[in-house]
Amino acid sequence: MTSAQTTVSLSIDGNEMQVLEGTTIHKACESAGINTPTLCWAENLTPVNVCRVCVVEVEGSRTLVPSCARPAEEGMVVYTDSERVRHSRRMVLEFLGSGVDLDQATPLHEWIVRYDADIARYDQPDLPAAIIDEPTKIQDDLYIRDYNRCVLCYKCVEACGDDAQHTFAIAVAGRGFDARISTEYDVELPQSACVYCGNCISVCPTGAIQFKTEFDLRRAGEWRPDQQEITRTVCSYCGVGCNLEIHTQDGRIVKATSPADHSVASGHLCVKGRFGWRYVQPSI
Amino acid sequence: MTDLHFTSDRADSTEIEAVAAAIGNETVVVVETERLIRGGKERRNQSRHLLLPALHALQRAKGWITPGGLNHVADVLQVPPAEAYGVATFYEMFRTVDPGHSESVTHVCVDAACQIAGSDMLSDELTAAGSAVHRSPCLGQCERGPARFVQGVGTADEVPADAELFVFHQQGDPSLRLLKRIGVVDPGSLDSYRANGGYVALDRAIEMGAAAVLDAVADSGLSGRGGAAFPTGVKWRAMAAEEGRPKHVVANCDESEPGTFKDRVVMENDPFSIVESMTVAGFATGAENGWIYVRGEYPLAAARLEVAIGQARVAGLLGPDVAGSGHTFDIEIRRGAGAYICGEETALFASIEGFRGEPRSKPPFPTTHGLFGQPTAINNPETLLNVLDIVALGADEYRSRGTEQSPGTKLLCLSGRVANPGIYEVEFGTSLGQVLEMAGGLTGSGELRAVLLGGAAGSFVGADSLGLPLTLEDTRSAGTTLGSGVVMAFTTDVDMTPVLIRIAEFFRNESCGQCVPCRVGTLRQHETLVQVGRTGSITADRRQLVDDMARAMADASICGLGHTAASAVSSALALGLIGGAK
Ligand SMILES: Cc1cc2nc3c(=O)[nH]c(=O)nc-3n(C[C@H](O)[C@H](O)[C@H](O)COP(=O)(O)O)c2cc1C
Ligand code: SF4
Ligand code: SF4
Ligand code: SF4
Ligand code: FES
Ligand code: FES
């Protein structure tokens, strides 16, 4: 936050409100109790504002604006549920669902219903809509990548790069609908710069990258998140003190995550905290 | 030495030498603790801006960018290899897969003007004759289609048509302003440029002082010629007021809007005018750095600009004390590598900086956060060219041509079914019909069917629009645009369906892929048109879908590419050019 804590007044859906300068429209909506869909935004990452599912209408602006990244301004008049907003949000959801598998993109499911997104309408007689259709990359025992589920939200790239890990093992390659998250020349992860911190997995909203443990259980039809227990602890490997959340199902560890709101690691871990629990149960 | 991780592939001596020749013996030395800072976006100001020139060198050396070559460049410039690969795969002119041969590759334009001039046939002939052919988007030679560009391996790139005689249909016309030197001046000679009125404007600008130049530009009513028609005076004043240093002036010579070739003609035939006008811009706004970003498919333009910059430096017209004014200004050229999106200003900055050419949301605007995050005035070269006349003639005299809201003259790119395609300078307010007459009227067997105004990002108007005065205000109220000055004529003997399918494919191919509405919308729009092409008509529900997609792309995309990607298609449907019934 900037030096002086000045406030700005704006109106959202007809309600006048005041927020601290620098607050995004999305945050302002949240404090007004207005729920806004987001996909590429996360508390612990720099906004890239690429998915456009969070767009709102701002009076005087020719196009809709991404609420996750745009700071509220004095006198702004914002509409979050106008016909234009609903239309664009619906189309973004349709576009996403028409090209990739959103089955595991749970945060989007309620929005698809809410905006009445008709994902099937893109197939045409004799001309099925192009989809991303690539074999799942299973290159080691720790995690898998299934880009048929990838919405290109850039979160993994940010987590691997500037926003957390500074390893830069993955980046966006190619252009347009052919753009993919990739290592250099698509080399297998073990040959790349990847250090297996798993930070990309923890930010992925769609299951496009996931722990091998989770992938195997899902494939066996045995993934039951509602029956999992989460135990909070502190990683014992070094003195930094990253908080760990150990997820267990039927008494076995299935994955380790870190709370995004914790000050030490902001949700990120290293390979030891992320996968070091394996000595407890060498093979699952 | 460092903690970047590389695969075991190594560059060979050809590649190492080619890279050294392109970027000098630049190496970034990183000490362990610097990694985190240099590894991130903060690194932009370091050597990463040499990535694009280095990739060009690799591509030319081998005909593709090998894993070993990429590792070498990534190591020398300390760019993570995954990111360098992401950049290399962004551009049309770069290959990251071994093509299996080391022949030069002939790019054949498949966009509208060339498509209706038989580019498919040319491709087939060249392929049959054993050439490696690459289907290319508009090559900026729409007046001489089907256009070709030859990308060399181990040799320089070339444009076969450059060997032919240059024809300029308005040569000798005393009313010319912007094009008065075209075909008259020797593009390789500063003396010739001076003998034809060159550097009068810079002298005058120095005499007047920076503030007076800014006033004149504002008073002239000049607006940007790159497509968005933003008032240049407002932009320059805002940038001049910025106190951050250094500041930049950028000439946006990416010119990739299908149907546009005006900037190429100026760069090739009057390159000093661009150097001079950028110098005036630098003087007026207090910028010390000038950059020319010229599209990769314009080798002649880049070479002539390079010569002009060299001569201007020797004459003291660039450098630490420009023409004795005490002001410092110099210019660097950057070649693009085949990406329409890199003409979008923020994408262009990213491209120069060595990142993928992905636009970013505005605000903040380039005047405060431009190249390297520093204050920047970016303009189309035609916009800059106008400044020479504004300074030399004064704002009042400048405004004596054109209309109140569209003062001055405009460069138009005439192509398609006209007798004398080419570049024309016309006074704002000239009607569409008069312009077609200037270009010798229609050719071919049919009547006028439609005219594409403003390029692929513009829109079609019908034969009933011949009376339309070509001004910013009249085109806007008619629901169309002058855009970058494209006037492409189609007659009734042209089958419009393939033309529209290709326009849709253009956007699909050129979308940077960053935002969902454009990445997927352009794909689905293309698929829908392919289906219309197959069935010959459009059903009500497909029509609804096209409209739904168009609205979302226009409303929710990040940049102008997505905002305008449905414009030509929508106008064609409204005019009944495709899809059957009107
Ligand atoms: C997809 C896209 C491509 C563009 N290409 C160009 C271009 O090749 N040349 C250009 O001058 N402006 C281009 N523009 C417009 C620039 O973003 C910018 O508005 C312009 O360079 C500003 O200069 P002006 O004010 O002199 O017109 C493009 C915009 C978009 C969205
Ligand atoms: S596991 Fe860590 S290092 Fe590997 S790709 Fe993911 S974020 Fe990058
Ligand atoms: S893999 Fe996941 S986090 Fe990465 S871009 Fe795709 S959806 Fe986003
Ligand atoms: S509108 Fe298209 S080109 Fe522009 S940022 Fe979005 S995806 Fe990229
Ligand atoms: S959440 Fe705002 S653009 Fe993705
Ligand atoms: S060069 Fe072919 S359309 Fe422009």
Image (cartoon, coloured by chain):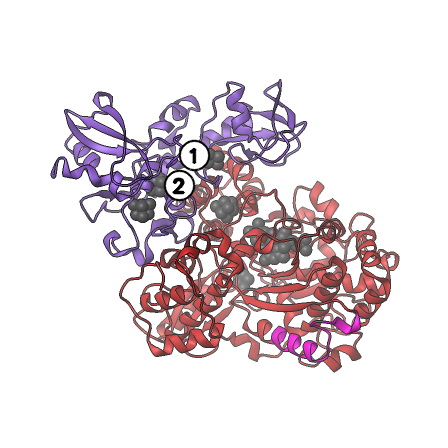
Chain colours: A purple, B red
Mark 1 surroundings: few (<14), some (14-19) or many (≥20) residues within 10 A: some
Dot 2 or dot 1: first in sequence order is: 1
Name the spot of residue B279 as percent of width and height, x first. Answer: 72, 66
Disc 1, SS: loop
Name the spot of residue A223 as percent of width and height, x first. Answer: 19, 28
Question: Looking at the image, can residue B226 be seen?
Answer: no
| In the image, residue B568 above or below residue A101 | below
Q: Which residue is mark 1?
A: A42
Q: Quadrant of residue B39?
A: bottom left
Within the displayed image, which quadrant is ligand 6 positioned in? bottom right
The verdict on residue B306 being magenta is yes
- Residue A155 - label: 2
Secondary structure, magenta segment, majority class: helix
Q: From the viewer's side, name the closer residue of B386 and A271.
A: A271
Q: Quadrant of residue B75?
A: bottom left
Q: Which residues are magenta?
A: B304-325
Callout 2: residue from which chain?
Answer: A
| In the image, residue A89 above or below residue B37 | above
Name the spot of residue B352 as percent of width and height, x first. Answer: 53, 60
Q: Residue at x 69, y 80 (%)?
A: B314
The verdict on residue B549 being magenta is no
Q: From the viewer's side, name the closer residue of B189 and B144.
A: B189
Callout 1: residue from which chain?
Answer: A
Q: From the viewer's side, name the closer residue of B108 and B516.
A: B516
User: Does the closest atom of ligand 5 sit within 8 Å of the Cβ of label 1?
Assistant: no
Looking at the rendering, in which quadrant would you find the C terminus of chain A?
top left
Callout 1, which amino acid?
Ala
- Position of residue B291 in the picture relative to residue B536 (left or right): right
Rounded to the nearest angstrom, the CA distance separating label 2 from label 1 is 8 Å
User: Does the closest atom of ligand 3 sit within 8 Å of the Cβ of label 2?
Assistant: yes
Are the two marked residues, 2 and 1, in contact with CB atoms closer than 8 angstroms? Answer: yes
Disc 2, SS: helix
